[in-house]
């Protein structure tokens, strides 16, 4: 018997594959479909910090504390004030009522403002955990790396303080000292999700305008989370979830071998439909069977860097082998 159970955020997941925050998890009905497809958990589509702050502010021109991105607030003021907070809390409660898998609420945020009290409301509505998708693009030349990193810590502490349920933080890879930052950040949250996928831009050279690049990842993008999870597994406090570029059962196996407690999948399900989750899980089961593993704990982290006999040269050796072989 193959046992696919895993523990993530102190929760027992019946399978290690979580449906990532996206339109696939936008409603209780959508969450029900994910559960029927054997997802281990779902992360609800995010509510934006700006939506929460906009509802907290009483008048149109009210001062919005913690305001980092005025354009985002203006956008929300015009498009997103439709009782977003209440609807989000309802979705949490409805989703929890119709499925028996963990339902993780998600907040997309850039600062530790007044909105952090919302995390408590999400807990009271029944959220099993909170995932903070922190997205602070390091494009403002006036903000130092240290300032940006401090904001991540502030958000983590404020939200952790507000709730008693587990808190995960989904971050990007763009930090100058990623290992040190991730280890320190992991002391403030219960799990790190590596990585979120920055909104990507492209140029339309005929119209000379900016256009969004592909919203969906491709399988080669797994290389980034794979490298960092294998580096950080055993070094961070708490759990790790892999996100970005996991498109099949092999990707799930790789992330678990690197040391992930769970994986999050999004683009592959958009491309193929939710039924594809069954295929991913069947591939994982088949691989475990072929290797003689009956549970995930038997192989999780087997390929992490910490297990290597010489961790410091691990990557350099790989590079040297490849570069000396190519003329
Ligand atoms: C259409 C779409 C909507 C998304 N919405 C959210 C969201 O609300 N919150 C969030 O944290 N991530 C969101 N994401 C990012 C995904 O959760 C995930 O991190 C990203 O797509 C990388 O995983 P993948 O390679 O499996 O697609 C969205 C992605 C897509 C494609």
Image (cartoon, rainbow, N blue to C red):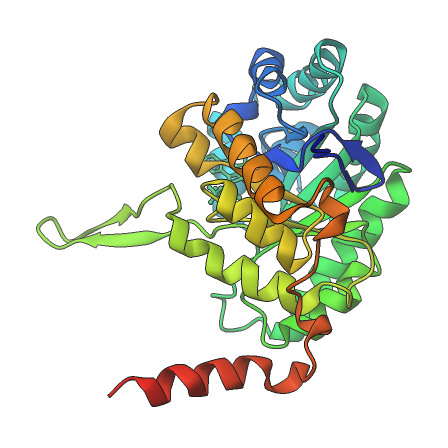
Q: Residue at x 60, y 75 (%)?
A: 144
Spot occupied by residue 220 in the image (x, y as percentages of width and height): 39, 55
Q: Is 68 situated left or right of 90 in this image?
A: left
Say which quadrant the C terminus sits in. bottom left
Spot occupied by residue 168 in the image (x, y as percentages of width and height): 74, 46
Q: Which is more toward the observer, 173 or 258?
A: 258
Q: Which is more toward the observer, 45 or 241?
A: 241
Residue 192 at least partly seen: yes
Spot occupied by residue 21 in the image (x, y as percentages of width and height): 57, 34
Q: Which is more toward the observer, 9 or 157?
A: 9
Position of 99 relative to 42 (above/below): above
Q: Residue at x 42, y 49 (%)?
A: 199
**Of all residues shown, which one is farthest toward the left?**
206
Position of 97 relative to 12 (above/below): above
Q: Is 318 situated left or right of 36 in this image?
A: left
In which quarter of the view is residue 90 placed?
Answer: top right
Report how many numbered discs are placed on residues in the image. Answer: 0
Q: Is 92 situated left or right of 80 in this image?
A: right
Position of 194 relative to 95 (above/below): below
Spot occupied by residue 123 in the image (x, y as percentages of width and height): 83, 28
Say which quadrant the N terminus sits in. top right
Residue 80 at least partly seen: no
């Amino acid at each position: 018997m193959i046992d696919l159970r895993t523990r993530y955020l102190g929760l027992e997941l019946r399978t290690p594959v979580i449906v990532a925050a996206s339109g696939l998890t936008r409603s209780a009905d959508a969450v029900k479909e994910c559960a029927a497809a054997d997802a281990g958990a779902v992360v609800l589509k995010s509510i934006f910090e700006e939506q929460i702050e906009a509802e907290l502010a009483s008048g149109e021109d009210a001062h919005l504390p913690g305001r980092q991105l005025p354009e985002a607030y203006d956008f929300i003021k015009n498009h997103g004030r439709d009782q977003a907070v209440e609807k989000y809390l309802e979705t949490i409660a409805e989703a929890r009522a119709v499925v028996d898998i963990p339902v993780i609420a998600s907040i997309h945020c850039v600062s530790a403002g007044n909105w952090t009290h919302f995390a408590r409301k999400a807990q009271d509505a029944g959220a099993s955990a909170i995932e903070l998708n922190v997205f602070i693009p390091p494009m403002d030349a006036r903000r130092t790396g240290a300032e940006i990193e401090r904001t991540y810590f502030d958000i983590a502490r404020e939200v952790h303080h507000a709730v008693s349920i587990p808190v995960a933080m989904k971050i990007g890879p763009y930090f100058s000292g990623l290992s040190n930052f991730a280890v320190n950040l992991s002391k403030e949250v219960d799990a790190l999700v590596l990585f979120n996928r920055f909104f990507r831009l492209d140029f339309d050279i005929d119209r000379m305008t900016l256009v969004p690049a592909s919203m969906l990842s491709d399988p080669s993008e797994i290389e980034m989370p794979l490298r960092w999870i294998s580096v950080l597994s055993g070094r961070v406090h708490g759990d790790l979830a892999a996100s970005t570029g996991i498109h099949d059962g092999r990707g799930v196996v790789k992330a678990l071998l690197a040391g992930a407690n769970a994986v999050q999948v999004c683009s592959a399900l958009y491309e193929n439909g939710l039924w594809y989750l069954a295929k991913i899980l069947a591939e994982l089961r088949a691989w475990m069977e072929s290797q003689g593993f009956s549970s995930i704990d038997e192989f999780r982290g087997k390929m992490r860097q910490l297990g290597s006999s010489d961790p410091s040269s691990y990557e350099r050796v790989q590079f040297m082998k490849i570069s000396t072989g190519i003329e």
